[in-house]
Amino acid sequence: MDNTSYIAGLVSADGHLDKNEKSVSIYSNDRTFSEKVRVLLEEESGANAKIYASKNAFKIYSYCPSFYDLLVKKYNLFAGRKSDRLKFPENLNLKKMKSFLKGYVDGDGCIYIDKRKRRGKINFYPRVEIASKSKKFLTQAKKFLEKNNVICGKIKNGKRVFRLCVYANNVKMFVQFIGFRHPQKILSFPIPQGVD
């Protein structure tokens, strides 16, 4: 696992870069996860990071100009509103790409268990769904996953975002190849994850 790439993925999904302050913010609704991210951000940036609690979320904040510059230059992240112009970083090695996508999925990914009745028997089908306002970002993510034998469904246009889904047996491949760090996602689909 490359922690800097993981943080870059989290920032791409649920974060914000402030150009004027050269600061990094990441948002989460899980206190335990927020604390883990705070520690990671401090370790990778070399700067202090704090957690601010609001009514609906936790904000992990760090003033870290050199780390801000690294995220902008190496990972093509944007300051300000970024969601519709997000780019999948293609200049990274495999380990960093996997770590980046793991961070993104921990932020803007969901796990569902679809329940279907067939021949009087109820079957459960897992599904991983990755959301983005940038169709290009999801197209690049799909290309990366399928190049590494994780077959995805078609990219669907939702009400406000595009969605890329991984279904059934391919979910196991996804979890073993990319996996999760977010405790709620690990509990939602507790199968052995691949080792980075």
Image (cartoon, rainbow, N blue to C red):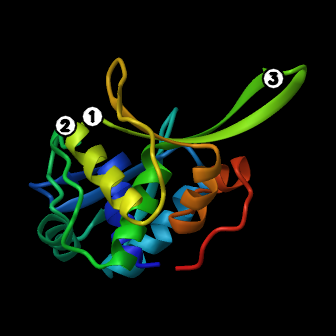
Q: Is residue 61 visible?
A: no
Q: CA distance from mark 1 to mark 2?
A: 5 Å
Q: Amino acid at mark 1?
A: Lys
Type of the residue with mark 2: Asp
Tell me the distance, in whole angstroms, between the alpha carbons under discs 1 and 3: 35 Å
The residue singled out by tag 1 in the image is: 133
Q: Quadrant of residue 117?
A: top right
Viewer-nearest of labels 1 and 3?
Answer: 3
Could you tell me if residue 62 is visible in this image? yes
- Residue 156 vs residue 35, the one in the foreground: 156
Residue at 52% of width from left, 33% of height from top?
A: 55
Residue 14: give x, y in percent of width and height: 37, 47
Residue occupying the point 56% across, 62% down:
179
Q: Amino acid at mark 3?
A: Arg
The tag earlier along the polypeptide, 1 or 3, is: 3
Identify the residue at image location x=35%, y=35%: 155
